[in-house]
Image: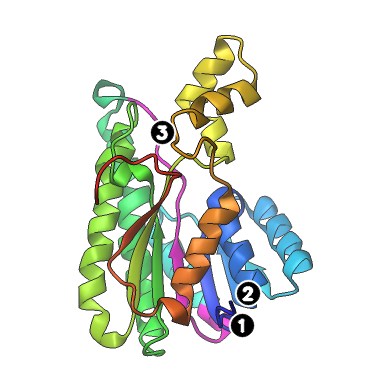
Amino acid sequence: MDLGLRGKRALVTAASRGLGRACATTLAAEGAQVVIAARQHETLEQCAASLREATGSQVIAIPADLRVAEQIEALVQQTVAVLGGLEILVHNTGGPPGGGLEDCSDTHWQDAYDLVLLSAVRLVRAALPFLRQHPGEGRIIFLTSSAAKQPIAGLVLSNALRPGVVGLAKTLSRELASAGITVNSVCPGRIATERLRQGQQVQRALAQGCTEEEAFQELAQEVPLGRLGRPEEVGALVAFLASQQAGYITGAAIQVDGGFIQGLW
């Protein structure tokens, strides 16, 4: 299927590795022009060079810290300046640190709020004037987590804030429908990324003498499909949601989790 993304202009945040990189890779492979953003300048430049070589598409690195309002505004302005416009916005962030309620201070809560939820508000607000210039083509996609639908033990910050991003997306899907802009959330489950390797369950298993492969196998046993997800499987869904074929999908929160989430919605 040709997704019709050739020549479309996209901004993907937290894209130097993991799920953000997978999304940027898929969009670029489909012919989109992509700006990737992350905090680490050198790593980001290396990622952009790698994606250009792998896909043949224009991939540009613009460093930005999504916790800083001025850097978000500058990121969007620079993106539009180098690409000449913007049709696709993919909001992704690193996850907040793990811990329960008593482990998290007010500073932890404020940092997590700035990173996960307020950055989404600020990024969309900055990008909207440019997305509105392309009626019927504007796409906003939020990468969240399965925690938005089913809380994960030991991740109180993520459990509290990820649903807020889904709520924002649902609200925006109605507010922006008349402009032809679709807004959707993607909720990854257990995907084999560096973040999963650094997660509490894997680190606990390693401390008990398990190998990383054994720790991953233990996690996979709790997934009905019996395996961990691949980052490119998340990227494929994001690319589809960015396409014209997905023009009648908006306000959805779609999990990519191998059946892990047990709820109906």
From this view, report whether residue 179 is shown above or below residue 35.
below
Q: In this figure, which colouring scheme has been used for the structure?
A: rainbow
User: What is the x, y in percent for residue 228?
Assistant: 54, 39
In primary-sequence order, the first of circles 1 and 2 is 1
**Magenta segment range?**
80-99
The image shows a total of numbered marks equal to 3
The amino acid pointed to by label 2 is: Glu
Q: Can residue 90 be seen in this view?
A: yes
- Residue at 54 percent of width and 52 percent of height: 19
Q: In this view, does 129 lie above or below 122?
A: below
- Left or right: 186 in relation to 191: left
CA separation in Å, label 1 and label 2? 6 Å
**Which residue position holds label 1?**
6
Tell me, yes or no, whether the two marked residues, 1 and 3, touch with CB atoms within 8 Å: no
For the point 75% across and 60% down, the residue is 50
Q: Nearer the viewer, mark 3 or mark 2?
A: 2
Crowding at dot 1, Cα within 10 Å, few <14 / some 14-19 / many 20+, comes out as some
- Report the front residue among 164 and 265: 265
Amino acid at circle 3: Pro
Residue 97 shows which numbered tag? 3
Disc 1, disc 2: CB below 8 Å?
Answer: yes
- Is 11 colored magenta in this rendering? no
Q: Where is residue 116 in the image (x, y as percent from the top left)?
A: 35, 50
Residue 38 appears anywhere in the view? no
> Marks 1 and 3, how far apart in space?
37 Å
Q: Which residue lies furthest to the right in this view?
A: 53
Q: Is residue 93 or residue 214 the one in the foreground?
A: 214
Dot in front, 1 or 3: 1
Task: Report which residue position mark 2 lands on.
Answer: 30
